[in-house]
Amino acid sequence: MSRFDDISTPRRTKEIISRHGFSFKKSLGQNFLIDQNILYKIVEAAGLDEDKGALEIGPGIGALTEKLAQTAGTVTAIEIDQRLIPILREVLEPYENVKVHHGDVLKVDLHELFQQDFAGVSKVSVVANLPYYVTTPILMKLLEEKLPLENIVVMIQKEVAERMAAAPGSKDYGSLSIAVQYYSEPKLVCIVPHTVFIPQPNVASAVIRLAVREEPPVSVEDEGFFFEVVQASFAQRRKTIANNLKSRFFAGEGRERLEQLLQEAGIVPSRRGETLSIEEYAKLSNVLYNADIR
Ligand code: SAM
C-alpha cells in the first residue's frame, strides 16, 4: 500500500467521510488526525513491535489504527459511535490483526477484554487520540484497574498533559500529577498544532507517554486513604497544608494534635500542598493512618 493511500491523508479522510455521509459529533470529542508525521510519532513513542499488542480507544475512521496494525502484532479498538463501525470495517479490511468493538470504554470490562484479545501477547500498550471530554476518567480507569500495560501513549489537551507531568512546586502540580505519577512515569512527547485535525479543536494538544510502573514508587498503608489525604491537601490551593487537613480530618479536634502529627511526618504546618513530593504525601498519609485519623 503506498503512503498516498493511507486513511489519514486529508484527501482520503474527506472522501471516506463524505461517501458515508458522516457528520462529526462534538459531544463525542470527534477530532480526527490527518497528519502522517504525528501518527508515526505517536506509534513510535509506544515502542511497539510484532510481538506486542495495542489497545486503541476511539479509533474514529481508523487513521491511527492502520499505523498500529502495520506495527503491532495484535490491535484491538473500542469505538462508542455506531456510525463509525461500518467505516472501520471497510477501511481496516486489509488488516487481519485488528479487532473493532462497539462500546463505551468506561463501561467495558477491560480485564475480560484483555483475556479474550491479548491472550499470549507479551506486552500491551494503550495508544490513542483520546476524546478530550473524558480524558481523565479514561486514564484513571486504565491506571487504577492495574491492567498489565507497558505504556499509555495518548494525545490529550496540552494543559492536562502538563498537569500530569508537573513536578512539586510548579503551578501545574496537583492531585492529578500525584495520581498519574503514583501509577506511571509521565513524559511529554510533543506539542501538537491545531492544524493536524479535522475539525480543528479549540484547545492546544500534546502527546504524552505514561510508562506504567510495576510497583508504586512509595509504600502506603492504604491507597484509598493516601489519595484522600492528597485531595484534601489541595482542596484550597491558597491555604496551608495544616488548614486544609484541619477542615477535612480534624474538625472536632484541637490544632495541637494536627501539628504534632505533621511534625512526626517531617512537614512544616505552614507549607502548601503544592510543595510536597509524593514521598512526603506517603509519609504523611501513613502517619495519619497509623494515628487512626481517617
Ligand atoms: N483515533 C481517531 C483519530 O485519531 O483520527 C479519532 C480520535 S477522536 C479525538 C476520539 C474518538 O473517540 C472518536 O471516534 C469518538 O467517537 C470516540 N469516543 C468518544 N467517547 C468514547 C468512549 N467513551 N468510548 C470509546 N470511544 C469513544
Image (cartoon, rainbow, N blue to C red):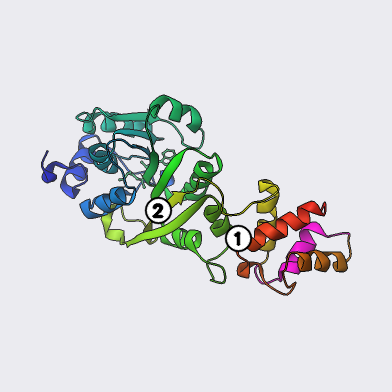
The image quadrant that residue 195 belongs to is: bottom left
Task: Give x and y (percent) for residue 155.
Answer: 37, 52
The answer to whether residue 184 is above or below residue 82 is below
Task: Give x and y (percent) for residue 36.
Answer: 21, 51
Residue 67 lies within the magenta run = no
> Is 136 left or right of 290, judged from the image as shown?
left
The answer to whether residue 208 is above or below residue 69 is below
Q: Residue at x 57, y 72 (%)?
A: 169
Q: How many marks?
A: 2
In the image, farthest residue toward the top: 116
> Is 220 left or right of 2, judged from the image as shown?
right
**Picture disc at residue 225:** none
Task: Give x and y (percent) for residue 269.
Answer: 75, 72
Q: Report the amino acid beneath label 1.
A: Ile
**Picture disc at residue 209:** 2
Q: Nearer the viewer, residue 106 or 268?
A: 268
Q: Nearer the viewer, residue 209 or 137?
A: 209
Q: Which residues are magenta?
A: 237-252
Ligand 1 positioned in quadrant: top left
